[in-house]
Image (spheres, grey):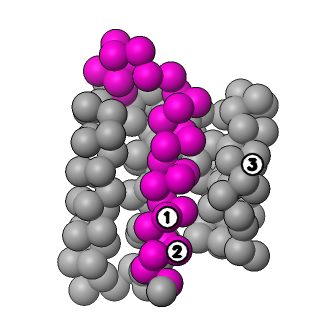
Amino acid sequence: MKLTKEQRLKRASDARAQGYNCAQAVMMAFPDVFTLPSEVTLRLGTALGGGMGMTGGICGALSALALAEGMRTEGEPADKVKAYKSFHALNDAFREQHGSTLCPELKASGVSCEELIKSGILMYDRYINEEAH
């Protein structure tokens, strides 16, 4: 099931409106990547909000992209090289766009979670669509 950007953004917005965190909202926007029942996808993202469980770590929206890249592999040891490389590029692009990848720094700069979710979704949607061509 291939979704449009608008459908992805709507799914994420609906998840946020229900109280789900940034990671869960981004993950719900990519059912075609996660290929898991939604309740499993939501469980996987539960502790990622607030910068890895409110520890001040990496933004949940960005963490979700790391999980998405893992889901696009077979999970074999050799898959790490490609997954690390692609996530590194996503991480750098996110940092360049927002000035940081850490939740507290992003919040302190005034960037809203909704903006980070949208940014992550648009970035990843563009990434997977460009890779397909």
Category of crowding for the residue at label 2, using alpha-carbon neighbours closer than 10 angstroms: few (below 14), some (14–19), many (at least 20): few
**Residue type, label 1:** Arg
**Residue type, label 3:** Arg
Q: Residue at x 48, y 47 (%)?
A: 120
In this view, 94 is above or below 129: above
Query: Mark 1 — residue?
Result: 126
Instruction: Decide if residue 43 is on the left or right side of residue 73.
Output: right
Q: CA distance from mark 2 to mark 3?
A: 18 Å
Q: Is residue 120 magenta?
A: yes
Residue 119, image x and y in percent?
49, 43
In this view, 58 is above or below 7: above
Residue 79, image x and y in percent?
30, 82
Camera-side mark, 2 or 3: 2
Q: Answer yes or no: do the residues labelled 1 and 2 have beta carbons within 8 Å?
A: yes
In this view, 7 is above or below 132: above
Quadrant occupied by the N terminus = bottom right
Disc 3, SS:
helix
Category of crowding for the residue at label 3, using alpha-carbon neighbours closer than 10 angstroms: few (below 14), some (14–19), many (at least 20): many
Closest to the observer: 120 or 78? Answer: 120
Q: CA distance from mark 3 to mark 1?
A: 17 Å
Disc 1, SS:
helix
Magenta residues span: 103-132
Q: Residue at x 53, y 32 (%)?
A: 115
Q: Looking at the image, is mark 3 or mark 1 earlier in the sequence? A: 3
Q: Residue at x 63, y 43 (%)?
A: 25
Query: Mark 3 — residue?
Result: 11
Residue 29, image x and y in percent?
66, 54
Residue 113 in sight in this render: yes
Query: Mark 2 — residue?
Result: 129
Residue 36 in sight in this render: no
